[in-house]
Image (cartoon, grey):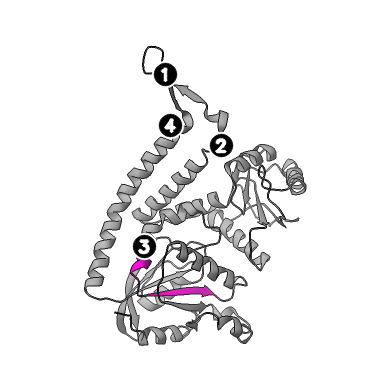
Amino acid sequence: MSKKTPFIPEYDGPKTLIVGVKAPYNKTINTESYFDEFRNLVKTNRDTYDTEVFFNLRSIDAGFFFTKGKLEELKELCEKEKFDEIIISEPLSSKQERNLKELFNTNRIFDRTSLILDIFEKSAKTAAGKLQVEIAKLKHDKSRLAGKGIFLEQQRGGIGIKGGIGETLKERQRRIIDNEIRNLKKQLEKFHQARETQRKRRISTRIPQVCLIGYTNAGKSTILNALTKADVLAEDKLFATLDTTTRKLWVNSENRGVISDTVGFIQLLPHHLVDAFKSTLSELEYADLLLHIVDISDPNWESQIKVVNDILGDLDIKKDMLYVFNKADKVSSLEKLQDKLEKYQPHVIVSAVEKNGLKPLQSFLYNWKPLT
């Protein structure tokens, strides 16, 4: 187990430990890249933290997630440092979360799902985006009701002279959450109908539609800005874009249709989020072409391609696709990658930040004709 304490000047927030884990179910090739991604998730959400610990885990304990040896090491560290909160890179069950909170004597345990939900909540800008995040949060809260046992003991009903057995507190809370989710979905449906009207208009006029997809922080928004002469937020942060943005597509000063950006994907993306954003991702169903943006400078770029393609498969999206290998300016030797790149066809290699760096993509789009 490796431990590091970052230098943080004048930091007066909650004392925070982050725990990065390479779990046995994680097939990531480059572990350090996976840990860097976790660090970036934490920094995207809160900017900083106090102490970080990273290690590989050979098996998962049903009650505490960590095996006995690692659990003792972490407990010893927590007793010494007395952290206010602990952020763990992996998703936890409600039982694991509750047990760890008690064992480590900390105010809060954040797992991967809670962390990503927090980021989504802060990143959502439009009303539709906020509704989708709220639905995902409620679904997550509902899942945490399971297994709370005596904490949600049964209440008595108030009907009749003797007072029959009422619903359990767990059942009542689940019913309240279900009602809130239904109400939010009704509100979201209004935005969905408005989007459907716009789509039908584009379809009736036969306007070609291109959609950007890809792993989070692959450079989709930067490419969108370059191709549309727009000014969409393009930050070096995970999930900087949540809400679908559609703009006119310009190639060589000619309008070639419309192009839409979509939320970035990430491995172990909570299924609550995928479900909540299905109305946004339904934009992909109407696309004539998908531009799969890939950060070729990331050591795990092939794993990231698989994550995106697996999610597309789960959504049953089957469309013509161009792999766009971005950030070529950060790669020392593209020649060494040629054999791997050949597996992904068709593809172009670009750099969204260099002058003329998007020419291969622009040339493809200029000559591309959608199937009618």
Alpha-carbon distance for marks 3 and 1?
Answer: 47 Å
Label 1 residue SS: loop
Circle nearer the N terminus (3, 2): 2
- Give x and y (percent) for residue 331: 60, 80
Q: Which residue is mark 3?
A: 282
Q: Which residue is mark 4?
A: 172
- Give x and y (percent) for residue 197: 24, 63
User: Are dots 3 and 4 in contact, CB under 8 Å?
Assistant: no
Circle nearer the N terminus (3, 4): 4
Alpha-carbon distance for marks 1 and 4?
Answer: 16 Å
Q: Which amino acid type is marked by label 4?
A: Arg
Identify the disc placed on residue 164. Answer: 1
- Give x and y (percent) for residue 24: 67, 58
Span highlighted in magenta in the image: 282-295
- The residue lying at 59 percent from left, 78 percent from top is 330
Alpha-carbon distance for marks 2 and 4?
Answer: 15 Å
Identify the disc placed on residue 320. Answer: none
